[in-house]
Image (cartoon, grey):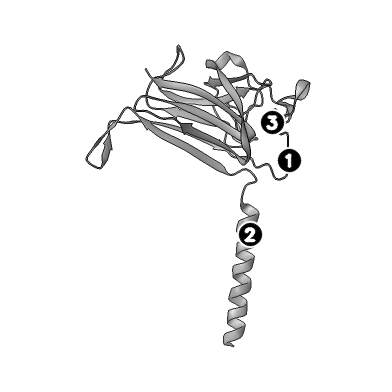
């Protein structure tokens, strides 16, 4: 009886584990976060302003040349949309508690959808007031990904520096790099491509 119970529990565990695995999204959500403008008082960091990015993280899974080349550059990543959602599934959301400067352009504190206009060696980062839908079929205004994106809601467009990596990054990653108390860089990394945009506190 004891061994039967053990077998039943083991089977239930394996079925449950399989179900959990089956429910994992193909492109899990991720978050990049950083604070600017604060300082340490003892062991506490006070007075900082949060910047966070919530985004879907697609995985290569054996694919290569994910952004393409020539006339087809960016087409696969855009998946039929006019621009890239800078991730997967729900629109990428960029939230800042402080006014930021990207070069000489102001991004006021707030929450935005973030997109990228992909051209070979010539990326443009876009912050937009387009709202984000929770699902493709959700009613109401807003976008799912970058489908039906229009430029009329753009708040800021800024060129990104595009380079290459010596290694391949399997899962699309957004990161904050070279941070100081008042400035840093936003990196978008996938496969062997990295694009960056510098920003600072206003």
Label 2 residue SS = helix
Which residue is disc 3 drawn over? 77
Residue at 64% x, 18% y is: 122
| Residue 22 placement: quadrant | bottom right
Q: Earlier in the sequence, mark 1 or mark 3?
A: 1
Residue at 62% x, 53% y is: 23
Q: Nearer the viewer, residue 105 or 147?
A: 105
* Residue reaching furthest to the bottom: 1
Q: Give coordinates of residue 70: x percent, y percent.
A: 76, 21
* Residue reaching furthest to the left: 42
Q: Is residue 110 placed above or below 65 in the rendered structure?
A: above
- Distance from disc 3 to disc 2, alpha carbons, whole Å, reads 29 Å
| Residue 61 placement: quadrant | top right
| Residue 131 placement: quadrant | top right
The N terminus - image quarter? bottom right
Q: Give coordinates of residue 196: x percent, y percent.
A: 54, 25
Which residue is disc 2 drawn over? 19
Which residue is disc 1 drawn over? 63
* Residue reaching furthest to the right: 71
Q: Is residue 178 left or right of residue 131?
A: left
Badge nearest the viewer, 3 or 2: 3
Q: Nearer the viewer, residue 64 or 106?
A: 64
Q: Residues within 10 Å of mark 1 (few under 14, many from 20)?
A: few
Q: Give coordinates of residue 129: x percent, y percent.
A: 52, 21
Q: Earlier in the sequence, mark 1 or mark 2?
A: 2
Residue 88 visible, this angle? no
Q: Is residue 22 placed above or below 114 in the rendered structure?
A: below
For residue 39, the mark is none
The C terminus - image quarter? top left
């Amino acid at each position: 009886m004891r061994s039967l119970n053990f077998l039943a529990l083991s089977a239930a565990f394996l079925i449950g584990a399989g179900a959990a695995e089956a429910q994992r999204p193909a492109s899990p959500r991720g978050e990049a976060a950083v604070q600017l403008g604060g300082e340490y008082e003892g062991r506490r960091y006070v007075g900082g302003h949060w910047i966070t990015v919530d985004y879907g993280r697609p995985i290569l899974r054996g694919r290569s040349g994910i952004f393409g080349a020539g006339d087809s550059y960016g087409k696969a990543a855009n998946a039929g949309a006019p621009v890239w959602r800078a991730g997967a599934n729900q629109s990428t959301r960029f939230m800042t508690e402080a006014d930021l400067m990207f070069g000489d352009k102001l991004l006021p504190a707030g929450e935005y959808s973030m997109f990228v206009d992909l051209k070979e060696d010539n990326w443009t980062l876009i912050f937009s007031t387009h709202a984000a839908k929770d699902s493709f079929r959700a009613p109401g205004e807003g976008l799912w990904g970058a489908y039906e994106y229009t430029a009329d809601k753009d708040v800021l467009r800024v060129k990104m520096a595009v380079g290459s990596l010596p290694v391949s990054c399997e899962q699309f990653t957004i990161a904050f790099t070279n941070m100081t108390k008042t400035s840093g860089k936003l990196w978008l990394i996938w496969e062997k491509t990295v694009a960056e945009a510098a920003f600072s506190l206003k």
